[in-house]
């Protein structure tokens, strides 16, 4: 490698050039020191062990897009292994004087980063980390008593009392890069990120374009075409008005600052539309809150925040779990959601809540099973939002609705997909079902079923459990848990 001193820009969940403070710092350092920037991404089998099939699919494309924006596929240096060791090996082998990264918030990453930063500083080198992927650091927002928050509304109010999020930073104009190949460098294909055990990701690219350019386009389209209707229609899966920015935010292809300020400009430019913009911004607030909880919790993925739920009598029904995963529960809105997820790697938020509720309440299956399935199949599966949301659904998380509030999948379907358009799209065997029965085909007469071409139990399943029976079973289990404590 060249004799010029080097700054490592360590990309992690910030796969973008614009609004990337660590990258700007690396470039500034290189320019001031007649040096160059070494852009690095490391796939760490331990820290990245939660990456599921869908997120691996996304990551492969996102890394490819980032490398191209840097100049060529080989411009982004890829490695596989223990990230701390790999950075230290690079420092041993080359004239590296500085290392820069943007912060992560899950415990394995923060522990690793703290140790690594200390080791780099001990060598007398520069090491700096930056706030880039959250609007508010988890330790910045505190209750009046100086503790972290457990409830969303006061958390978000406290955030709004802070100075407004800074403006996004422009991408650096020229990034001085070296071109020699380094020892142990991997190619993108060697990262082996394709879905396993077979490729089910064909439909993902019909819906999404991973990478920074795709993220920007998604944001512009949302602000121009859909934000106006967001507050009124965001709960309607049949309308698709939400931003669908979640996988782009997950991989940091766009920053929350860029999203925040775009929504804020929209509100300034459209007096009278402030309500819809602030509703959207408050959803970004849920993302902030999930990261706040992730940072302060010991182990959000496996330990219920409300300790009593460690005694909940979950059922281990493998067959029911499989029917849920495959979209064969016999509840049309649930099956539509699970099939949308499988086909596109995404599911509408309202439907995530319904399918989650049916799993943990009507089927009494542990929320960790739902979390694991979503981790594998969602393109936006995120250590904070996914674990936080499953605990919320399970009634055992932060600011969760109490367990005994149980969604009725028929009424939810009728309320949020009234004409059944969403169900018809994803459960085509119900396409010809009249509106009145689309969310409860088992109530239709034999004549109506015949006219719609449906034989219950053959062309479409009977419900996996009665709506009322499942609800009563869940309430009994909840009472059993309370008595066991
Ligand atoms: P929009 O409505 O356009 O919202 C904009 C952004 O705000 C989203 O992209 C997301 O970053 C954030 N956001 C919105 N709603 C929430 C929320 N309830 N909690 C946290 N952040 C939110 N979101 C993920 O990003 N990754 C996950 O792995 C994930 N798992 C979930 C699991 C369950 C069981 C549930 C109920 C929700 C989950 N969510 C998750 C939250 C939410 O469903 C998605 O963020 C949202 O559907 C993404 O669509 P969107 O980008 O169109 O959202």
Image (cartoon, rainbow, N blue to C red):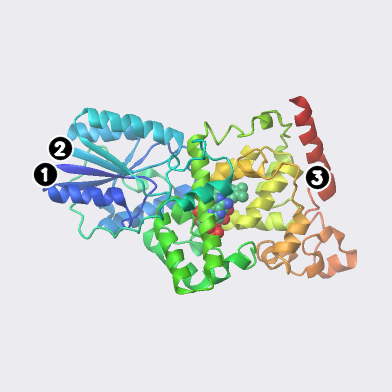
Q: Give how far apart the Cα atoms at labels 2 and 1 are.
A: 7 Å
Q: Name the residue under label 1.
A: 4
339 left or right, relative to 246: right
In primary-sequence order, the first of circles 3 and 2 is: 2
Q: Where residue 330 sits in the image (x, y, percent)?
A: 76, 53
Q: Where residue 54 sits in the image (x, y, percent)?
A: 50, 50
Picture disc at residue 422: none
Q: Mark 2 points at which residue?
A: 95
Whether ligand 1 has any atom under 8 Å from the Cβ at mark 3 is answered as: no
Mark 2 is surrounded, within 10 Å at the Cα level, by few (under 14), some (14 to 19) or many (20 or more) other residues, namely some
Quarter-of-image position of residue 350 = bottom right
Q: Foreground residue, 43 or 190?
A: 43
Q: Where residue 225 sits in the image (x, y, percent)?
A: 51, 73
Q: Foreground residue, 144 or 373?
A: 144
Circle 2: element type? loop
Count the marks: how many?
Answer: 3
Q: Name the residue under label 3.
A: 471
Circle 1: element type? loop
Residue at 52%, 36% in the rendered image: 145
């Amino acid at each position: 490698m060249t004799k010029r001193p080097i700054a490592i820009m360590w990309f992690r969940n910030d796969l973008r050039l614009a609004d990337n403070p660590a990258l700007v710092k690396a470039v500034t350092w290189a320019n001031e020191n007649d040096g160059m920037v070494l852009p690095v991404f490391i796939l760490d089998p331990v820290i990245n062990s939660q990456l599921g099939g869908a997120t691996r699919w996304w990551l492969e494309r996102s890394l490819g897009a980032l490398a191209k924006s840097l100049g060529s596929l080989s411009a982004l240096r890829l490695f596989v292994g223990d990230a701390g060791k790999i950075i230290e090996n690079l420092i041993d082998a080359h004239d590296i004087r500085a290392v820069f990264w943007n912060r992560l918030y899950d415990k394995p990453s923060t522990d690793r980063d703290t140790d690594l930063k200390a080791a780099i500083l001990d060598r007398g080198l520069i090491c700096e980390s930056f706030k880039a992927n959250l609007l508010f650091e988890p330790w910045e927002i505190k209750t009046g008593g100086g503790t972290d928050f457990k409830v969303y509304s006061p958390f978000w109010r406290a955030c709004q009392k802070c100075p407004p999020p800074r403006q996004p930073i422009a991408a650096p104009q020229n990034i001085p890069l070296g071109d020699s190949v380094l020892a142990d460098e991997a190619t993108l294909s060697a990262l082996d990120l394709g879905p396993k055990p077979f490729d089910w990701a064909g439909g993902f690219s019909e819906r999404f374009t991973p990478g920074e350019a795709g993220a920007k386009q998604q944001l512009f389209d949302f602000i121009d075409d859909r934000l106006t209707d967001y507050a009124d229609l965001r709960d309607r899966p049949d309308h698709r008005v939400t931003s669908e920015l979640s996988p782009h935010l997950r991989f940091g292809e766009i920053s929350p600052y860029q999203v925040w300020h775009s929504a804020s400009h929209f509100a300034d430019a459209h007096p009278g539309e402030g309500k819809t913009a602030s509703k959207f911004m408050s959803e970004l607030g849920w993302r902030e809150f999930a990261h706040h909880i992730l940072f302060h919790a010991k182990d959000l993925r496996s330990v219920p925040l409300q300790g009593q739920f460690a005694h909940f009598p979950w059922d281990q029904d493998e067959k029911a779990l499989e029917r849920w995963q495959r979209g064969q529960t016999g509840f049309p809105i649930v099956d539509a959601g699970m099939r949308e997820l499988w086909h596109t790697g995404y599911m509408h938020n309202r439907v995530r809540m319904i399918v989650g509720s049916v799993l943990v309440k009507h089927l009494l299956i542990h929320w960790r099973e739902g979390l694991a399935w979503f981790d594998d199949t969602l393109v936006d599966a995120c250590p904070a939002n996914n674990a936080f949301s499953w605990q919320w659904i399970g009634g055992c998380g932060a600011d969760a609705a109490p367990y005994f509030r149980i969604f009725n999948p028929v009424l939810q379907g009728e309320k949020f997909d009234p004409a059944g358009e969403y169900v018809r799209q994803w459960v085509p065997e119900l396409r010809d079902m009249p509106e009145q029965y689309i969310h409860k085909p088992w109530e239709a007469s034999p004549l109506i079923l015949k006219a719609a071409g449906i034989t219950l139990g053959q062309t479409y399943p009977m419900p996996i459990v009665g709506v009322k029976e499942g609800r009563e079973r869940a309430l009994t289990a909840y009472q059993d848990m309370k008595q066991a404590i």
